[in-house]
Amino acid sequence: MDKLDRFLDRAERLMEKLERTLPKFSSGIVPDWDSAHAFRWEHGRLAVVQHPHDIRLEDLLNIEEQKQLIVQNTRQFVSGSPANNVLLTGSRGTGKSSLVKALLNEYKVDGLRLIEVGKPALADLPHIIALVAGRPERFVLYCDDLSFNADEPGYQALKAALDGSLVAFADNMLIYATSNRRHLMPESMQENLATKYVGDEIHPSESIEEKISLSERFGLWVSFYPFSQEEYLAIVAHWLRHFGSSGEMDEFARQAALQWAIQRGSRSGRVGWQFARDWAGKQACGK
């Protein structure tokens, strides 16, 4: 009996350790939706984002067409009209993530709430849907920099949630995802070689069809493109004014901004913002 007691005692301690590591879905703990507008799904529960990004729509330059599409979709959503899940794809640093954050600042007074969900937590989508179902607020699940391999659990969970699961997607919830990949998954040359041609028709391989099947479940695709030199410099000038840099951007600042972009290999909005912070900071310190 002593051996059995020791075995049961060890098994009980092991179960306690396992319980501490597993997600605890706190369906009985309802967040105070009025106390915050941005949340993050962490370890099976919602955590309040205390200081969400305060970027505004007017701060995002040279993406007017993309902005118009997403603003219209979001306006429909917060008003209770039909709207689509959105996939924002394209070049890095061109405003995909910033645009989603700016939407929260624009529409939080109309009941919009943002829930950031990391890729590993997408397997918890049914729990998040159950948590917000029936609420009067309008929820955007925000998935940033999303890409998958086909065997990842979050891939199947997201695919099922968008279209195909028996669990109904909440009417007050949409998914806005950003990615550098149009189809959210890597593509290989071998898959393209497997494409078949029947007469004038192209028949993609099954693996390509599988990859496309996820991205096509987003009703609205919005593509972002690299900025030209003049567009980049306009962004720099905007952020220099924002950070209180005195005067117009002179030739010295212009050349410094271009050199900054060359060093980073990108003329993106993010790079322009980073340069403006550095330049304005140095000016404030008298350097």
Image (cartoon, rainbow, N blue to C red):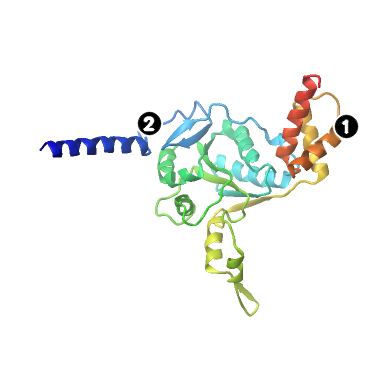
Secondary structure beneath dot 1 equals helix
Residue farthest left in this picture: 1
**Whether residue 17 can be seen here:** yes
Residue 180 percent coordinates (x, y):
63, 50
The disc placed on residue 99 is none
The disc placed on residue 252 is 1
Quarter-of-image position of residue 53: top right
The residue at the point 70 percent across, 38 percent down is 270
Between residue 224 and residue 149, name the one nearer to us. Answer: 149
Secondary structure beneath dot 2 equals loop
Between residue 177 and residue 168, name the one nearer to us. Answer: 177
Q: Which amino acid does label 2 sit on?
A: Ile
Mark 1: few, some, or many residues within 10 Å (few <14, many ≥20)? few
Contact (Cβ within 8 Å) of mark 2 with mark 1: no
The residue at the point 75 percent across, 29 percent down is 278
* Quadrant that contains the N terminus: top left
Q: How far apart are marks 2 and 1 (CA)?
A: 56 Å
Residue 225 percent coordinates (x, y):
72, 49
Quarter-of-image position of residue 108: top right
The residue under label 2 is 29
Q: Which amino acid does label 1 sit on?
A: Phe
Q: Which-is-in-front pick, marks 2 and 1?
A: 1
Is 227 placed left or right of 77 in the picture?
right
